[in-house]
Amino acid sequence: MPWNITHLWRGVALLGLLLASMAHGAENARLQLQLDARLDSLIAEQSAPYELPSAASGIPLVHTPEQVVAAPLHVGLSTLWLLSSALLLLHILREWTRVLRLRMHQHPHDEPLTHALWPTISLLIPADGCSAEQTRRLDALANLGSDYPQERIHYVPMFDPADIQVALAVERLIQRTGDRVHPLPMMAGPNTTLASALHAAVNTSIGTALVILDRDIPLPTDWLRRSVTPLLDPGVGCVLTRAIARQPQGGLLERLSVMNDQADTLLATDVDALNLLMCGKARIRALRREAIKALEHPELQRAPDGAGLVLDITRLGWQSALLADIQHYRPLDTPDQIRSPRLNPALALKSMRMAALLLRPGLAPGARRQGGAAFFSSALPLIWLLCLASGIGLYFSGAPLPAGLAVLLCAATSFDPHGQPRPAFRIATAARMAGVREEIRLLPLVSLSFIDRLIESLRLLLRREPRPRAPHAEAVAVVEKGRS
């Protein structure tokens, strides 16, 4: 019996221990569940996006100086990159449209009128070449061989009165044509160029337009009619012709540069007339005398080139017509040519001010479009530099992808030697138009060499000799003496 009671008490004790262990295990499980739930909540808080403190939350705002500067700077660089990239992409899209238009249509050509009320014009004969060449040109004017009415052609020979041989040729021209000759004596010098003589030539000449003789004689029969036909439109104040420099046969890059210029002149339309003139790829063929006389500009007699005059008459509402005729010139023959490179800072600023034409709805649509195109082309170098600078800034701020896209976009719109951004695919277009297989095989290397073209533009800018803007007192004195 005692043994049974002892075993009973042992069983009760074991049962109590078992119940106590079961209760302790349940408590441990409950604590483990609480710990797991707390750990899950901490992980969720850390993975959720961080919410900046605001005034509404009651948490004090604390910003480090780096955060205060970095956030607005990154937003500004991103905005600048987006804006400049969009403008460069629009420029590339426009160039592709021009290429496709040229491939679908024929090359530009002039359509001179056969029957019209041809106005009286004055033909300006520049003093190009040596005395023998000028004499031969003046003697050949008596038999011009043009189908333009001869009685409506007046001559304005530009010559140095100190050159006896040329002065005698002018006298012979006066004897042959009578009162249709209006001599323009200009003292020879570094400042006496064709561009600087335009204002004096307009005042000396008569008629509706002043046509510049920019090619050798004999002239094509319809040359004068093609030059004057655009001026039959009363809204046209200037007629431009395309110009390509004669380059000697050289290496691959030289041939590509020549084909680039040829493609650029062929792709240009009337809207791009001022752009070609600013890049030195166009020449003034004819000017409406009424438009030049309406300028009343005090610095016309010492204008460095003809582009300033064309920009001024465009600002007054006159538009320019671009002929399909291509004039070939030698690069060394620029002193007496109307050449206006875009690298001239004064002309670049003047063309950028053409943006005001877009806000003047009273002007002719053609003049507004040409003024807007001139402004956009002059602003392209600034847009190119802003895109490149914003890309570099985004790279250092921790955004390498936009930086790489900016560099690629700048490489695709690199500078040409005239200081104008140009899509690199235009080289491919020029090579395809010329049918040169060698250039096409090497185009991947040439298209990426935008750095050397930028260096070439800077080299031309540094080597460009400044042209003095002193008034041509001697030339004006000679002109006044000749009138008296």
Image (spheres, rainbow, N blue to C red):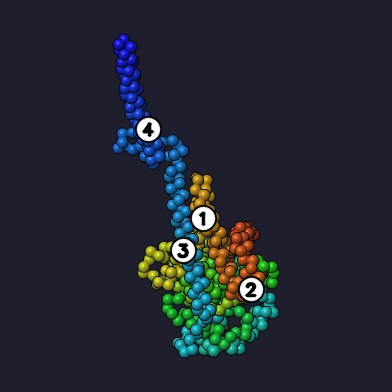
The residues tagged by marks 3 and 2 sit, at their Cα atoms, a distance apart of: 29 Å
Task: Give whichever of discs 2 and 1 has the lower sequence position.
Answer: 1
Residue at image mark 2: 436
Query: Which residue is at the far top?
Result: 2
Residue at image mark 1: 405
Q: Is residue 438 left or right of residue 290?
A: right
The residues tagged by marks 2 and 1 sit, at their Cα atoms, a distance apart of: 31 Å
Q: Are marks 3 and 2 in contact (CB under 8 Å)?
A: no
The residues tagged by marks 1 and 3 sit, at their Cα atoms, a distance apart of: 15 Å
Task: Give whichever of discs 3 and 4 has the lower sequence position.
Answer: 4
**Please, what is the three-letter code of the amino acid marked with disc 3?**
Leu
The front one of 382 and 347 is 382
**Please, what is the three-letter code of the amino acid marked with disc 1?**
Leu
Disc number for residue 105: none
Residue at image mark 4: 36
Secondary structure type for disc 3 = helix
Select label 3 or label 4 by which is in front.
4
Classify 10 Å Cα crowding around label 3: few (below 14), some (14-19), many (20 and above). Answer: few
Q: Are marks 3 and 4 in contact (CB under 8 Å)?
A: no
Q: Is residue 266 left or right of residue 47?
A: right
Task: Give whichever of discs 1 and 3 has the lower sequence position.
Answer: 3
